[in-house]
Amino acid sequence: MTAERPKLAWADLRGARVGIWGFGREGSANLRKLRSMGVEPVLVDDAPAAGDEPVLATGDGGLDALLRCDVVVKTPGISRYRPEAERLRAAGVVLAGGLGLWLQEADRDRVVLVTGTKGKSTTSSVLGHLITGLGRRAMVGGNIGALPYDPDEAAGSAGTGGDAPPAPPRTDYDFWVIEVSSYQATDLASSPPVTAVTSLHPDHLPWHGDVERYYRDKLSACSQPGAELTVANGDSDLIRERAALLAPRVAWVSESDEPGATWMDELGLPGRHNRRNALIARRCLLALGVPGADDDAALRAAASGYVRLPSRLTTIGVVDGVSFVDDSLSTNVLPTLAALDAFPGSRIAVIVGGQDRGIDYAPLAAGVLARHAPTLVLTLPDSGPRISAAFSSLAPPAHPADVRDCPDLDAAVAAGFAWARPDGMVLLSPAAPSFGHFRDYRDRAEAFARAMRGCAPA
């Protein structure tokens, strides 16, 4: 079970002995926030990088330093279920998260939290774009973009410069659209009245320990004190089966809602799942009371100019008639199936595989085998062998699936290009994280683009 969530705000940390555990992007923002309050925390990281700040290693004196703190502000990537976290709690140290500290003191009537296994970034960015297009000021942050409490948010990524004290975070927004990961959700002791959940599928099992705990942790963002309405994906049986974990009221949204409506066409987002994401965004706008949200013409104008997020079903080039589509951010089965569904009649060579987190790949195999258009599956290490095994167990012997194991991304792109010519598609939609072979999904996307360029005739 998750320990009781601390009902602390940032202001409560003044005068306390504070530690920061994890010194990446969010840890750096936490340090800036604390220093703006006159608090000088102890800094701890599992693997400290060289830099200007004195950071202790968790296993080399860092944990002992944290045990002497009153409050430890933890970065989301550090699991609350780690033995070290349990030891801190047993010693009476309060474990908090930056987003949870901010939400306790925010004007929650003007905040919407967006979570989900996949689709939360797209839905959050659409929400922010529409709010801006409808004439209101919106910040899109949290797991995507800036952190709402970061002093640097007031002055842009360059910071305040010089020796000037950091400026306070901006407060002149009309609305805050905050994307929440399953990791961050466990830090929240409250919810705003309006929350949204875009999808649910097994993910991040090493952090959460098991799939049911992952579901509970993920959906807890929708149901802490203050929650009134969850706008939820009504096409997901997993979410409907767990409706008791949502807010007291639920607005179910299906991809088939608003038949004939075309306002979301201006967003330029392919796939039925993205149609649903846009409809979830609209329902949130209505719940927030944003003027114009009930007007299709106003929404269509507001949707104009939307820029799709990178590595989400983005066509990056065409070589000799073959389209190359980057969907590197698809890190589990659900978005990969949605990506294939977005191009129902296309011949697709889909590249899958990466870090193996032990998720079940049978649904991926079943979805690919159900496609009517020709599909070649190219697998990558480390999860490639398990993906191949899932196909072998489901495909009838008389009609085996076309699955090929590849040693690396370059080989997969070359094989996919040769098969897809003259008018097919090579789709990078890995259904797995990139870690172990690439720095992150961006690094994997850049490698995909380089491999595509390598297919061009000299």
Image: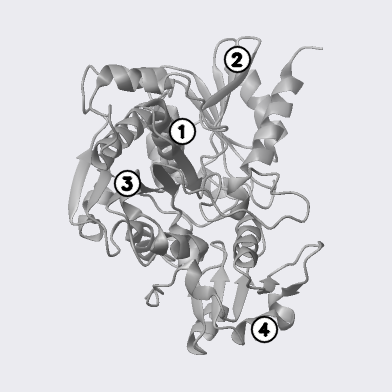
Q: Are marks 4 and 2 in contact (CB under 8 Å)?
A: no
Is residue 397 in view from this perspective? no
Instruction: Return the residue nearer the eye: 19 or 153.
Output: 153
The amino acid at mark 1 is Pro
Residue 339 at x, y percent in the picture = 45, 30
The residue that disc 2 covers is 322
Assess disc 2: are there few (<14), some (14-19) or many (≥20) residues with their C-alpha within 10 Å of its C-alpha.
Answer: many
The residue that disc 1 covers is 400
Q: Are marks 3 and 4 in contact (CB under 8 Å)?
A: no
Q: Is residue 374 above or below residue 439?
A: above
The residue that disc 4 covers is 65
Dot 1 falls on a residue whose secondary structure is: loop
Assess disc 3: are there few (<14), some (14-19) or many (≥20) residues with their C-alpha within 10 Å of its C-alpha.
Answer: many
Assess disc 4: are there few (<14), some (14-19) or many (≥20) residues with their C-alpha within 10 Å of its C-alpha.
Answer: some
Instruction: Return the residue nearer the eye: 441 or 100.
Output: 100
Mark pair 4, 2: CA separation: 56 Å
Q: Residue furthest front?
A: 164
The residue that disc 3 covers is 196
Dot 4 falls on a residue whose secondary structure is: helix
